[in-house]
Image: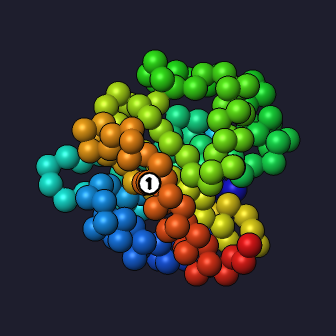
Amino acid sequence: MTLGSLHLDKTDVRAQAQRYLHGLVEHTGLTAHLAILDGDQLVYVDKIDSPGMVKMNTWVGRRIDAHCTALGKALLAQLPAHRFDELYKYKALEQRTGRTISSRDALKRELQRIRVRNYAVDDEECGIGVRCVGSTVFDRGGRAAAAIGVSGTTAQISRDKLESLGKLARVCARKLSKNLGFTP
């Protein structure tokens, strides 16, 4: 499957997500993203910038290792174990910062925690000074279709805000999933 076909398959998700992305920005003052998984890469398919001067170094179409992003980890957490093993059998986990998870076993433990709380956190794992939270969006077939969340600087998102932002991302993801026909 090519990125182009993935994008076309996700067009409905992207259209449906617009109001949730705007709502996240209005409610938090942070940048909101929608992304999909393509192999072991996260691909941003939509972005709404935060108001003000601080802008995230992301753009629609940007690809980045999934293991070091909140949206990527939210999506990796939904993969069957055999699929995860296939993706990371021979691939090393690049350590982008000192906080990046760089072992498969540690990543598997983190994905289990994400499945329990239903949101993921990137606490300066992808870039120093940046924090993100995200949650998985499911399609009517119960498959992980995308992930939605918010990003900001460590000055904008203190560690004590991560849980409340995670819960907010989870609520948005659940509502968007319901709009896409998912029934838990």
Task: Say which quarter of the image contains residue 73.
Answer: top right
Q: The C terminus is located in which quarter?
A: bottom right
- Residue 106 is situated, as x and y percent measured from the top left of the image, at 67, 26
Task: Estimate the x, y position of residue 148 in percent, counting from the top left.
Answer: 49, 59
Count numbered badges in the picture: 1
* Numbered disc 1: secondary structure: helix
For the point 46% across and 30% down, which residue is it?
A: 125
Residue type (three-letter) at the residue carrying disc 1: Ser
Judge from the rendering whether residue 90 lies leftward or rightward of residue 22; answer left or right.
right
Measuring 31% from the left and 60% from the top, which residue is drawn there? 28
Question: Would residue 173 appear left or right of 56 to someone viewing this image?
Answer: right
Q: In this view, does 89 lie to the left or right of 151?
A: right
Which sits in the foreground, 94 or 8?
Answer: 94
Residue 76 appears in the rendering: no
Q: Is residue 22 above or below residue 158?
A: below
Task: Say left or right for 29 vs 104.
Answer: left
Q: Can residue 122 be seen in the rendering of this structure?
A: yes
Residue 102, quarter of the rendered image = top right
Q: Position of residue 66 (x, y in %)?
A: 57, 40
Looking at the rendered image, the quarter that the N terminus falls into is: bottom right
Q: Which residue lies furthest to the front in this view?
A: 160
On the image, the x and y values in percent for residue 127 come to: 38, 31
Q: Name the residue under label 1.
A: 164
Residue at the outermost right position:
82
| 96 versus 57 height, above or below | above
Residue sitting at 66 percent across and 67 percent down? 138
